[in-house]
Amino acid sequence: MKNKIRIGLYGTNGHQIQNKLRDHPLSELYAVAGFDDKTISSLGITPKIYSTLDELIADKDIDLISLCSPRRSEQAKEAIRCMLGGKHVYAEKPCAMSEKELDEIIKTSMSAGKVFHEMAGTGFEQPYAAMRDIVKSGKIGTVVQVLAQKSYPYFDTRPQDEDIDGGLMLQVGIHAMRFIEHVACAKIADIETAQTKLGSTKEGDLHMAVSYLIKLENGGVASAVANYLNPRAFPSWGNESLRIFGTKGFIEAVDGGKSTRLVLNEKDCGPIEVKELSEDYFDMFASSLLGKGKMPLSLEDELHPLRMLLKARE
């Protein structure tokens, strides 16, 4: 068994993991493609440098390819090519832009025997991992209603073509859906949406705000908002909130996750205990590939929030 996984990185359109790989105990940056000279010079090491994804796939020494593709609408096909070429895949969200593409990714992962994961760690960062543990403990009882928000700043440089980054509904809204499924542990049964382009400074396909009305499989309900309306004066890039209401109390995180509270029917418990995590979602992925750990979600459960968004979008 290998001691470290050799990683190839393709593209920088998203949260590429080059900084994560510095002195990583389980993996190493081996090669890149689709990187500009400035980004390459900032890596701190000199990996193999390729021009195309196909060159990365052809390199037999690479175990896993991390995709932040220049056009998100092409990323599902590229993920499938990687797996058919013998590589595991870690893909920026949204990993697919249609439910058919999502099914093809899962099918190819199974048939090729290669592991696929989306960069789906929203619910496994703090304080959301601690909130997930409280929900799973049953402390707030049966989850009846969830309120989720994800907001980013607007810049004129945001792509007007939603095929480039997936667009507001998918690439921002996915966080809110993960809050509901991966933190509140309530599976989504149906989503209705309403979007607007109001507030954009340019002509194009970019939506500025979206609202979601959601039915949960357990009979509960949820609502969520996502937008590009977070003021730049707000102290964090992402302005997110999450409130989970159960039959025995509620739990919340507001102000970008900086403030938390647990209130039970008989006691206001105040802020929840938030411990530093020993690993993030990529660490879990690397550990699982080396036979040293397990992923916290099945692939179907990991991708179900996206599946339900794609159903709503289509």
Image: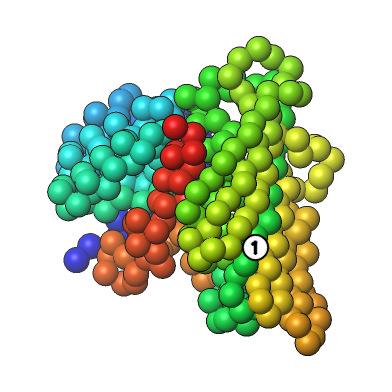
| Residue 8 versus residue 12 in the image, above or below | below
Question: Mark 1, residues whose alpha carbon is within 10 Å: few (<14), some, or many (≥20)?
Answer: many
Query: Image point 76% across, 72% down: which residue?
Result: 261
- The residue identified by callout 1 is 145
| Residue 300 versus residue 96 in the image, above or below | below
Query: Image point 39% across, 59% down: which residue?
Result: 301
The location of residue 310, given as percent across then percent down, is 44, 39
Query: Image point 66% across, 76% down: which residue?
Result: 247
Residue at the far top in the pictured view: 203
Query: Image point 16% across, 47% down: which residue?
Result: 112
The location of residue 46, given as percent across then percent down, is 39, 39
Residue at the far right in the pictured view: 233
Task: Locate residue 62 relative to residue 149 in the image: left or right.
Answer: left
In this rendered view, identify the residue nearer to me: 274 or 102: 102
The location of residue 165, given as percent across then percent down, is 51, 30
In this rendered view, identify the residue nearer to me: 245 or 10: 245
The location of residue 13, given as percent across then percent down, is 49, 32
